[in-house]
Amino acid sequence: MNVIYKNTLSVENYCLLRKSVGFYVIPEKLVKLALEKSDFIISAFINDIPVGMGRLITDGTQVLIMDVIVHPYFQKKGIGRTLMKYILDFVKNMDYTQIFVQLLTENNKIGFYEKSGFSKASTEGAEGMWLEFIKDNNT
């Protein structure tokens, strides 16, 4: 299985991947805007067929990971782990002293994110996960 990773994602492929995992439909106009406003996009293809994606948005002090999706047929084959590696490598190369990486997930996916270093975080009315990076930019 030869997986190709790209830093691009079409509106159509975004919608197809969301549909593959049963996520609600977002109007294409809003998908286009979301993709344009994303600071980083990674997608996975097998034979030019989209099988996975992930993206993030950031304000420079906090990162929100969004839409990490792998088509159900291709789950448990390392694609999600590789998508997260690309996303976290992007974060590690950002210019920051301290940055918080956050995401929301379904309860049955918590273990997947814990393997990438995330910790479960509960706040009033919401559950998510977070990861903190600290580095000295003066060296």
Image (cartoon, rainbow, N blue to C red):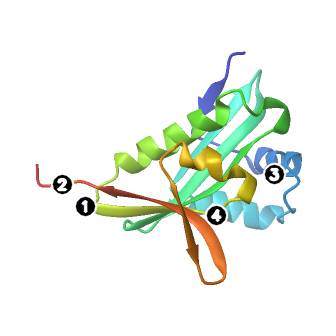
Residue placed under numbered mark 2 in the picture: 137
Q: Earlier in the sequence, mark 3 or mark 1?
A: 3
Q: CA distance from mark 2 to mark 4?
A: 29 Å
Q: Position of residue 57 (x, y in %)?
A: 53, 61
Q: Tell me the amino acid under the disc marked 1.
A: Thr
Marks 1 and 2: in contact by CB < 8 Å? yes
Front-lying residue, 24 or 38: 24
**Which residue appears at 63% of the width and 47% of the height?**
111
**Which residue appears at 50% of the width and 39% of the height?**
86
Q: Dot 3: few (<14), some (14–19), or many (≥20) neighbours within 10 Å?
A: many
Residue placed under numbered mark 1 in the picture: 97
Residue placed under numbered mark 3 in the picture: 18
Q: CA distance from mark 2 to mark 3?
A: 37 Å
Residue placed under numbered mark 4 in the picture: 104
Q: Secondary structure at mark 2?
A: loop
Q: CA distance from mark 2 to mark 1?
A: 6 Å
Q: Dot 2: few (<14), some (14–19), or many (≥20) neighbours within 10 Å?
A: few
Q: Earlier in the sequence, mark 2 or mark 3?
A: 3
Q: Tell me the amino acid under the disc marked 3.
A: Arg
**Which residue appears at 71% of the width and 29% of the height?**
45
Q: Dot 1: few (<14), some (14–19), or many (≥20) neighbours within 10 Å?
A: few
Q: Earlier in the sequence, mark 2 or mark 4?
A: 4
Q: Position of residue 118 (x, y in %)?
A: 50, 53
Q: Position of residue 127 (x, y in %)?
A: 63, 71
Q: Secondary structure at mark 1?
A: loop
Marks 4 and 2: in contact by CB < 8 Å? no
Q: Tell me the amino acid under the disc marked 2.
A: Asn
